[in-house]
Image (spheres, grey):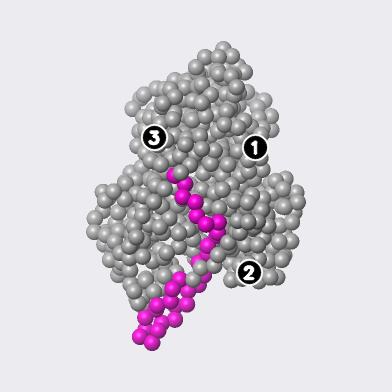
């Protein structure tokens, strides 16, 4: 969630983000709240962030151009997250020679993961793939790895409040309760979604459903134009504007908002949730979810890197950028890496997170109106918690919306993911959001807070009155102070296009202007679009491609 979604209308351009700020992850010891925890400690140093999701309609054509570039042009792509790797993949397919430069020693950016000394993976986020991810699914198809997606039943599953009343002996034996929205496969969209909502009687009353449906009518009738207009409102403001009961927020949309962007309905732009709902109502399997069958660096980023290198490109790790070197006319002449290494190319694509882009942006460009909007874009904090238990806590093979004040979504990865399979013991991966108040706290404190929340969800296994107590064997905590960009209201005008006023400098990343917002789909699409802009400039420019000074007349409107 990225982990949930965000989505929208079709793409016309023929046609991931990278690293994030500092993160802390460790295999902790000691005891948290009296609960036994692992005894050894490992500290990892890479920076990291989790990914969120976003959904979309029809995928654009795989080919970016029918003609090869006049000469094989070299393109430096800074960042090996989904945006950077996607960009390089489509560049190499178009006959270019990309060199991907990743600052860390692991691929993936916001989908990075690491192995501990036991051989267990821990990730930057809980990554979910949706049926309405056309560009992502097209990428899986082109890489011939579609079988790595483990599709779940077409449902959305929410935790309900568990009856924590002790039995006569003072112990709690109540099983966790879930509420499901099941989308019937025999109905087309939007009927399958409507039936899923109507058949769920646990969470919303008929009156609440009717009033919410009436509020959605403008989005259904007017489509994307209406959705974009609603960026001026937060989701809570939109709900109040349409006289929808607050309980609808409490029951459903606090969980959905946190899944989409790790923030609450009072902060998130109404456009983000409307885009998601629009896709879910318009595409029969748009809300169907899949888990990757293993860790993203190996199962997704690895095949991308192999494709790039097999076709003449390069993917290099441990190559942090220190500075853009500029020519006299303000264009990029080279990249200066840590240690003094220089990398020259014909064109340059930044696939770094927006917070890092702002730090490295040359002062010579700072006064350009095009880049001024970046100051309004910031990464959102999030924390991913991994808990290995000594027994099974749940048998649900799906993403779960916790409806907890602290937790967003979670899953038992020992069930949902082939590589993490364990028939006897659970491994819960949980997203803590909003996380601003917990960033920088000790891993022990974060795990203690997580366990307090899990006591509400699994009282028969966790807590002093648990009849069948479960113990934590070990844990990892991944803190990401700046993850995907924070999708608060009114930010659409601040998002830059993939082409810029600098003729040989391009942008990719979920924060750039594309329809799928802060998500894995958005990252992949942004990389694809950036590659398209490079190809367009390189093909049209001939020998003069990517040359010339700063275009001070450049506007985003002209670039779109």
Residue 229 falls left or right of residue 17: right
Name, please, the residue furthest toward the top: 543
Find residue 553 and report its horizontal and vertical position in percent: 67, 25
Which residue position holds label 3?
Answer: 103
Q: Magenta region: which residues?
A: 148-176
Which residue position holds label 2?
Answer: 204
Q: Secondary structure at mark 3?
A: loop
In the image, which is nearer the foreground, mark 2 or mark 3?
A: 2
Which residue position holds label 1?
Answer: 11
Q: Nearer the viewer, residue 450 or 367?
A: 450
Q: Residue at x 51, y 26 (%)?
A: 93
- Crowd class of label 3 (few under 14; some 14 to 19; many from 20; radius 10 Å): many
Q: Nearer the viewer, residue 455 or 553?
A: 455
Work out whether residue 477 can be spotted. Answer: yes
Above or below residue 512? Residue 41 is below
Q: Residue at x 51, y 37 (%)?
A: 141
Q: Residue at x 68, y 57 (%)?
A: 191
Above or below residue 312? Residue 17 is below
Find residue 160 and report its horizontal and vertical position in percent: 51, 70
Residue 459 falls left or right of residue 40: right
Q: Judge whether residue 153 is colored magenta.
A: yes
First reached walking from the N terminus: tag 2 or tag 1 = 1
First reached walking from the N terminus: tag 1 or tag 3 = 1
Work out whether residue 503 can be spotted. Answer: no
């Amino acid at each position: 969630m990225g982990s949930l979604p965000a989505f929208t209308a079709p793409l016309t351009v023929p046609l991931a983000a990278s690293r994030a700020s500092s993160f802390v992850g460790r295999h902790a010891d000691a005891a948290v709240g009296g609960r036994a925890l692992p005894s050894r400690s490992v500290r990892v140093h890479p920076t990291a962030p989790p990914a969120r999701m976003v959904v979309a309609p029809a995928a654009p054509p795989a080919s970016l151009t029918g003609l090869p570039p006049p000469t094989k042009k070299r393109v430096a792509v800074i960042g090996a997250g989904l945006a950077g790797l996607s960009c390089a993949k489509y560049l190499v397919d178009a006959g270019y020679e990309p060199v991907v430069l990743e600052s860390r020693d692991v691929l993936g950016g916001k989908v990075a993961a690491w192995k501990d000394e036991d051989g267990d993976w821990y990730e930057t986020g809980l990554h979910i793939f949706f049926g309405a991810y056309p560009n992502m699914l097209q990428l899986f198809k082109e890489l011939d790895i579609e079988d790595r997606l483990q599709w779940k039943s077409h449902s959305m599953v929410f935790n309900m409040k568990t009856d924590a009343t002790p039995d006569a002996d003072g112990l709690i034996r109540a099983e966790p309760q879930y509420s499901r929205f099941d989308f019937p496969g025999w109905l087309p969209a939007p009927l399958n979604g409507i039936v899923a909502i109507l058949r769920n009687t646990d969470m919303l009353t008929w009156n609440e459903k009717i009033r919410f449906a009436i509020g959605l009518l403008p989005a259904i009738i007017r489509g994307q134009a209406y959705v974009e207009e609603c960026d001026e409102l937060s989701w809570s403001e939109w709900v109040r504007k349409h006289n929808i009961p607050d309980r609808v927020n409490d029951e459903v949309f606090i969980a959905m908002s946190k899944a989409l962007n790790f923030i609450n309905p009072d902060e998130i732009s109404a456009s983000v949730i409307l885009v998601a709902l629009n896709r879910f109502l318009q595409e029969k399997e748009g809300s169907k979810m899949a888990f990757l069958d293993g860790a993203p660096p190996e199962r997704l980023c690895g095949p991308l890197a192999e494709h790039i290198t097999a076709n003449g490109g390069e993917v290099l790790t441990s190559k942090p950028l220190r500075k853009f070197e500029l020519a006299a006319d303000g264009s990029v002449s080279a990249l200066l890496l840590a240690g003094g290494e220089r990398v020259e190319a014909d064109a340059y694509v930044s696939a770094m997170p927006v917070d890092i882009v702002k730090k490295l942006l040359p002062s010579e460009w700072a006064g350009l109106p095009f880049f001024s909007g970046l100051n309004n874009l910031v990464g959102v904090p999030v924390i991913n918690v991994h808990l290995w238990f000594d027994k099974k806590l749940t048998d649900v093979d799906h993403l779960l919306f916790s409806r907890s004040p602290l937790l967003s979504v979670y899953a038992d990865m020992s069930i949902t993911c082939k590589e993490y399979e364990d028939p006897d013991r659970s491994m819960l991966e949980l997203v803590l959001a909003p996380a601003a108040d917990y960033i920088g706290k000790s891993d022990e404190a974060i795990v203690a807070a997580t366990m307090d929340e899990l006591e509400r969800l699994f009282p028969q296994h966790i807590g002093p009155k648990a009849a069948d107590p479960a113990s934590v064997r070990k844990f990892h905590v991944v803190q990401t102070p700046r993850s995907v960009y924070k999708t608060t209201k009114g930010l659409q005008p601040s998002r830059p296009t993939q082409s810029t006023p600098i003729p040989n400098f391009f942008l990719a990343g979920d924060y750039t202007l594309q329809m799928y917002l802060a998500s894995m789909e958005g990252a992949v699409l942004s990389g694809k679009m950036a590659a398209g802009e490079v190809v367009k400039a390189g093909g049209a420019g001939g020998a003069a491609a990517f040359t010339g000074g700063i275009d001070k007349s450049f506007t985003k409107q002209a670039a779109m």
